[in-house]
Image (spheres, rainbow, N blue to C red):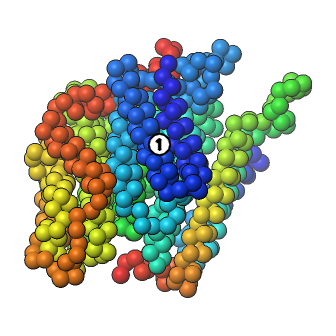
Amino acid sequence: MIEQIPYLAVILIAGIGIATILLKKNLIKMIMGLAIIEGAANLFLVTLGYREGGIAPIFTSAPGKEMVLPTVQAMTLTNIVIGFATTALLLAFAIMIYRKYGSVETNNIRRLRE
Amino acid sequence: MSQYAALLLAIPLIAAFAMPLFGLIGKKIRNSWAILTMLATVAAALILVWEVLTQGTIIYAFGAVDPSLTIPFDSGGVPIRILFVIDAMSAFMILTAAIMMFAATLYSISSESEQTGQDGYYALLFLLMAGIFGMVSTGDLFNFFVFLEINSLAGAALAAYRIKGGVAVEGGLKYAFISTVSGLFFLIAVGMLYGQYNSLNIAYIASVIDFTGLSLVAVVLMIVSLAMKSGSVPMHFWTPDTYSSAPSSITALLIVSSMASLYAIFRIAFSLFGLTMNVVTVGWVIIILGILSMFIGVSMALPQKDVKRLMAYHSVSQIGYMLVGLGVGLAVLGDQQMLAQFGVVAMEGGIFHIINYALYKGLLFLIAGAVIYRCGTANLNELGGLGHSMKWTMGFFIIAALAIAGIPPFNGFASKLMIYESVFVFNPFIAVIAMVVSIMTLASFVKVFHSMFMGPKLPQYETVKEVPMPMLIGMGLLAVLIILFGLFPDLVVNTLVEPAALALIDRSGYITSVMGGI
């Protein structure tokens, strides 16, 4: 049972992120929701690679013990970098919208539809 | 072995990051560098497509002693490097992307010539292309995610590039949001597959797959996230906003990137899971998504006043045709007799429609861009009488509009006919809907033609003249290809489309090309 807790946390965190995106009207909060989903994805990947009592996967003079999986860790690192770029881009858009519209509430960002 | 697979990515990536340096030297140098890069990339793409068509599937293992060495001797029979697997279907997508890249870059040289910040514009444009080429050639799931993100970031930044008082940023923001959410769901699905099969290689997972409940969740997540990115109903709400506010040449490329997402749906459905999943159910889900996209897209398009918004809703509707064609192929994948009778033709129609759609829809958006470039407005109620001054543009518009409505002898007719014929055998009701949608498309474009080009010359557009040469060449190439594809559909189907459809069906061939006869 104890091994399942991280997966439950992943589902919970992803749910919080999705709910934030769907329910909040403020752009900055919606971007935060996106970052929370990204955290859930990262946690999921790292948990997949964890082995009980495993050591760091460095082969040079390693004691012949079980190792944690390195591929998912590399994937997590890549995703953190990508997430950084996406969040920066989205926040830049939010700044631009605030300058032009004077608001970051989605109710006021409707100029395109008129 | 072929180095062109690596060059296809290396050229646009290096050129993109060198672009600001060339921009420091001067405007002419920068434009020449952009054109040179575009020509080099298109040349590499064409040579690669030629090699695939003559020699069969090409594998390129990055970082291996020999690029064709997919499985190192000490890895225990598991492919460990990032692999590019370019079969006939990937080659088909590379060709589509290369044609659109040629037209859009040439068009940008003129249409953006008055604008600021062109260094960043071309840098992002080449990053977008690198992302698309990577998405359609990679044989590795995580690598696909990385290219998807490169493509999304560059696409969102380009869509918002001309701020236009904030509306372009609004479109770009929606695109960035939807692509990031879809990318993250795709990544979680990749994680689920990795957790079960300890590999990211599509061919390896396909060779050991054992369809469990978790794989079902992964399939659903992948198809939903990629459908979101390709702009089909019910996740289509971003397409009109983003397509209408982005610069026109970029809209033409965003269409190609939505095609790349569509390609990924079918690569995953046919090559990764294939018959291990319940193809009838998944096929029907895709068909229903397609019918809804067709119908909702076209009915939303009819009342639009903004020409680019109208065209954007039509692109939702056209994606429906491809989903229906390939969905029918997927639904009958398990039944050899039905597959031979009409399944293959339906798939060929869907695949042929991908390139046709990219050609005429790209051309339509470039025409809308040309009209906006000269008149400064996209509102159909204000435009009028342009046929007197923009004769070439009007001619191209007639070709593209007849092609999208499926009137012979243009290319839209050729692929739609294949879809109608085969889908009619599968289920007559779907074929009838497809034809009705086609008629509504024609009605909508007659309206656009009438309000943009017909009527007396309006006083406010007295000084309007034809657009510059590079824009005309870009549009002209697409128009010529539309006519050629419409006149000789058999030639195109036999050389390009049929191998692509067979490559999708032949799942074991895809596995063998990587795993080597195991």
Circle 1: residue type: Thr
At 44% from the left edge and 29% from the top edge, which residue is drawn? Answer: B86
Q: Position of residue A79 (x, y in %)?
A: 65, 50
Residue assigned mark 1: B37
Q: Is residue B458 visible?
A: yes
B305 with respect to B386 (left or right): right
Q: Nearer the viewer, residue B216 or B394?
A: B394
Task: Check the image and report above or below for B115 versus A40.
Answer: below
Is B468 in front, or is B202? B468
Q: A78 or B341, which lies in front?
A: A78
In the rendered structure, the answer to whether residue B77 lies left or right of residue B127 reads right
Q: Is residue B96 left or right of residue B512?
A: left
**10 Å crowding of disc 1: few (<14), some (14-19), many (20+):** many
Indicate whether B153 appears above or below B187: below
Considering depth in this image, is B271 or B481 the residue closer to the camera? B481
Residue A53 lies, in percent from the top left, at 85, 37
Side of B313 where B172 appears, left or right: right
Q: Position of residue B102 (x, y in %)?
A: 36, 45
Which residue is located at x 23 percent, y 50 percent?
Answer: B476
Q: Residue at x 17, y 36 (%)?
A: B489
Pinpoint the chain carrying mark 1. B
Helix, strand or loop at mark 1: helix
B75 lies above or below A47: above
Which of the 4 quarters of the picture holds residue A71?
A: top right
